């Protein structure tokens, strides 16, 4: 007999014994019958010291809940900021985990405690909304000297960051995907960094470190726009009469256009990712666009070059502009123009010696039989010179759907730059 069959037979015997035993219990004693070796059932009878036991159990549960809440807050308050002691004796901000409603933060000294209190205020609809106000207790004996990569990764609440004088090292990826970040300000005494109207640079202004993702919100407030405007063919039918052509160009010039300062030689890793920019002017003299420098700028329509000087807050004039990248550029990093689907012209100057993998990936698309985006790339060098000079990564040109199979974006070699319109 198999093991399975033996188990089945044993179970049948146990069931039969149970049924026989159960049937021997008098029906009027079924709920009070005492099984030998077990305590007699307590039916409608009180347990000894029941009240005391109930109080003890309630107290234990209350203490357990209180301890749980205490440690939850303890963990919250102490895990909002994580630091690392570096070998040179300095301190690095490794990770900031926003506990809730911290919208502005100054990075200067180690935070030893996060205190909070709640308050209620009315919203625009007249409803009561509870908020939390945080007070950061800092240890001014321990200055912060470095900000680690991804320290603020994917924070969706912080809108303003101030960099203290003690911070001498900021990883380019520190503020990656901070979707609400509007401005980064730097203490004037900081030896390594500065800001220009809320955009982060090295002190000598030769490298652009971070153009905050939501910088357009800061600019709207600065210039007095009460709402975000997106161009649409239906603006008249939507009753938005103020969105006339003049208003549109004025808005886009002030809010969705950025002139990179003439001193800049490098646009760093992730420096302008996810921005709401429509047009970027690069200076002639720029040498490097690092990896992911303009990653997923879905609305970016034009990247042009300007020569000469442009006053802060002004745009270059037509005589200063030439389409696409500067002749001085030598390096285009991996995924640099990834997903730049609104751009329609890309020119690779003759000085370029490196193009990283997937530099233009996702920047071309076949939309119902019509090619849009960077569906062809023009290069100054002829094909042989280009292959001899340029180190190009895998699939740098990108692809687009072409019927059943994807097609690589073609490169047109030995081309002259298209004149400015």
Image: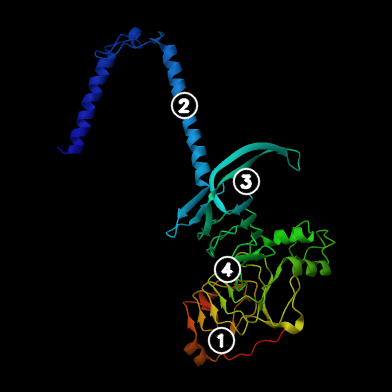
Helix, strand or loop status at disc 4: loop
Q: In the rendered structure, which disc, 3 or 4, sits on the residue that comes first in sequence?
A: 3
- Distance (Cα) linking label 3 and label 2: 29 Å
Identify the image's colour scheme: rainbow, by chain, secondary structure or one colour: rainbow
Return the x and y of residue 44 as percentages of the image width and height. Answer: 41, 8
Residue at the image point whose x is 50% and y is 34% from the top: 70
Pointer 1 local density, CA inside 10 Å: few below 14, some 14–19, many at least 20? some
Q: Where is residue 20, by image quadrant? A: top left
Residue indicated by mark 1? 351
Q: In the rendered structure, which disc, 4 or 1, sits on the residue that comes first in sequence?
A: 4
Quadrant location of the C terminus?
Answer: bottom right
Residue indicated by mark 4? 295
**Residue 319 visible in this rendered orientation of the protein:** yes
Viewer-nearest residue: 413 or 110: 110
Asked whether the residues under the numbered discs 3 and 4 touch, taking CB atoms below 8 Å apart as contact, a structural biologist would say: no
**On screen, 20 above or below 379?**
above
Mark number, residue 232:
none
- Distance (Cα) linking label 2 and label 4: 51 Å
Return the x and y of residue 391 as percentages of the image width and height. Answer: 47, 82
Residue indicated by mark 3? 101
- Distance (Cα) linking label 1 and label 2: 71 Å
Residue indicated by mark 2? 63
Helix, strand or loop status at disc 2: helix
């Amino acid at each position: 007999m198999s093991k399975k069959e033996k188990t089945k037979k044993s179970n049948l015997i146990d069931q039969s014994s149970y049924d026989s035993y159960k049937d021997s219990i008098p029906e009027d004693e079924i709920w009070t019958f005492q099984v030998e070796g077990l305590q007699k059932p307590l039916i409608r009878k009180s347990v000894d010291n029941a009240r005391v036991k109930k109080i003890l159990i309630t107290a234990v549960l209350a203490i357990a809940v209180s301890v749980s809440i205490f440690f939850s807050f303890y963990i919250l308050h102490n895990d909002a900021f994580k630091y690392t002691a570096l070998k040179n004796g300095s301190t690095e901000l490794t990770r900031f985990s926003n506990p809730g409603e911290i919208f502005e933060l100054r990075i200067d000294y180690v935070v030893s405690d996060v205190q909070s209190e709640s308050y209620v205020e009315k919203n625009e609809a007249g409803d009561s909304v509870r908020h939390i106000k945080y007070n950061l207790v800092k240890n001014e004996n321990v200055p912060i000297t470095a900000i680690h990569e991804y320290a603020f990764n994917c924070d969706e609440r912080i809108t303003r960051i101030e960099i203290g004088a003690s911070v001498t090292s900021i990883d380019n990826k520190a503020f990656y995907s901070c979707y609400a970040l509007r401005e980064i300000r730097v203490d004037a005494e900081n030896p390594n960094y500065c800001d220009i109207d809320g955009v982060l640079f090295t002190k000598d202004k030769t490298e652009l470190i971070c153009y905050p993702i939501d910088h357009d919100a800061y600019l709207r407030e600065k210039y007095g726009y009460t709402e975000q405007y997106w161009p649409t063919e239906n603006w008249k039918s939507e009753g938005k009469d103020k969105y006339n052509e003049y208003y549109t160009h004025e808005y886009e010039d002030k809010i969705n256009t950025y002139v990179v300062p003439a001193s800049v030689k490098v646009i760093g890793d992730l420096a302008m990712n996810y921005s709401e920019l429509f047009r970027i002017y690069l200076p002639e003299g720029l040498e490097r666009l690092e990896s992911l420098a303009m990653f997923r700028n879905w609305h970016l329509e034009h990247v042009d070059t300007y020569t000469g000087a442009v006053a802060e807050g002004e745009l270059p004039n037509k005589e200063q502009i030439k389409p696409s990248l500067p002749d001085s550029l030598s390096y285009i990093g991996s995924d640099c123009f990834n997903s730049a689907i609104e751009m329609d012209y890309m020119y690779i100057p003759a000085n370029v010696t490196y193009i990283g993998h997937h530099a233009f990936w996702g920047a071309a698309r076949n939309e119902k039989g019509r090619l849009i985006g960077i569906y062809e790339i023009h290069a100054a060098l002829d094909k042989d010179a280009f292959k001899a000079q340029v180190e190009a990564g895998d699939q740098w040109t990108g692809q687009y759907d072409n019927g059943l199979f994807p097609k690589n974006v073609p490169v047109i070699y030995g081309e002259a730059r298209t004149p400015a319109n």
